[in-house]
Image (tube, grey):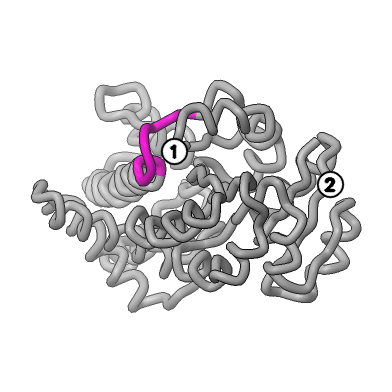
Amino acid sequence: MLRIGLIGFGRMGAPICANLVKAGHPVAVFDADPDRESAVIECGATWRPSPFEVAANAEAFITVLPGSAEVDAVMSDAVLDALEPGATWIDMSSNTPTAAAVIREHAHARGVDVLEAPMGGGPDDADAGTLRLFVGGDSELLARHRPLLEVIADPNKIVHTGGPGTGYTLKLLVNLLWFGQAVATAEALLLGHRAGIALDVLHDTLAGSAASSEFIRRDLPGLLAGDYLASFGLDHIHDQLAIVTSLARDLHTPHDVADAVRRIHQLALERFGPVDGELLAVALLEEQAGLRLRR
């Protein structure tokens, strides 16, 4: 059993913590919200009042945070100094390759190993221990920590993406395509419905056609029932899409479609504010059309 330090006890961090405890790992936890202390203790973990105290005894130090700003705020030099040489920092946050690179260099200078393992899936997947992980870093380090990660994720969905930065990048690309599919599907449905095609016919036909996607098969029924997926902040979504377009500019690849997806989410952010809702860009399109996508 590894001594685990966990930073972040939110929608994803709490079920991850519970699974680690069930597997027999001693887990010390810090969260920026002190009101979560009782839930941490009830989960079977130990509450610590600072990231420094979590790091001080951790063999595996796991961050489960919304984005790069939150990771930067936690991963100070003091926290890195508290980690013992040979410990491993595993970042499961929706981080960026550029932001993480600086912290990774500081960690390596102190003898701390680093794996990036951003997640695919939602709170239900975290609860079931069936997350998808996009793991960037040394393959031997991944092999050493695979038993730990298999407590959190489906063993068949732990993908080694390559060297440092590739895990973050692949997760960003998955997000780009998913959010792009969401708004493209919404535009098609609004047009088809306005033209007189019933939503049930649109859904069933698209799901069985060459235009089908995971979004149409799995997530569209929830949208048609009025669920905008309040599991992630619209501001963080826009930040991630902006990072994708910035990365494309830096690497000199086309990104007109990616930038269009980003602009739609920027308009949604301006309309609704930094609230939770992965499909609020669709709500914006519905407002613009004066038509709700409801069965």
Please name the amino acid that badge 1 sits on.
Gly
- Within-10-Å neighbours for mark 1: few <14, some 14–19, many 20+: many
Out of 263 and 117, give the one closest to the viewer.
117
Q: What element carries label 1?
A: loop
Residue interval drawn in magenta:
159-167
Q: Nearer the viewer, residue 172 or 273?
A: 172
> For residue 265, which quarter of the picture?
bottom left
Amino acid at dot 2: Pro
The residue nearer to you, when weighing 1 against 135, is: 1
Which residue bears the numbered disc 1? 137
Q: Nearer the viewer, residue 55 or 239?
A: 55
Q: Does the magenta stretch include residue 142?
A: no
Provide the residue designation for mark 2.
Answer: 26
* Residue 269 sits above or below residue 255 on the image: below
Please state the horizontal and vertical placement of residue 267, each as a whole percent of the image.
28, 72
Crowding around mark 2 (Cα neighbors within 10 Å: few <14, some 14 to 19, many 20+) is: some
Image point 55% across, 70% down: which residue? 76
Image position of 245 with respect to 253: above or below: below
Quadrant including the N terminus: top right
Residue at position x 47%, y 49% from top? 223
The answer to whether residue 129 is visible is: yes
How far apart, in angstroms, are the residues tagged by discs 1 and 2? 25 Å
Q: Name the residue at 65% across, 57% down.
A: 83
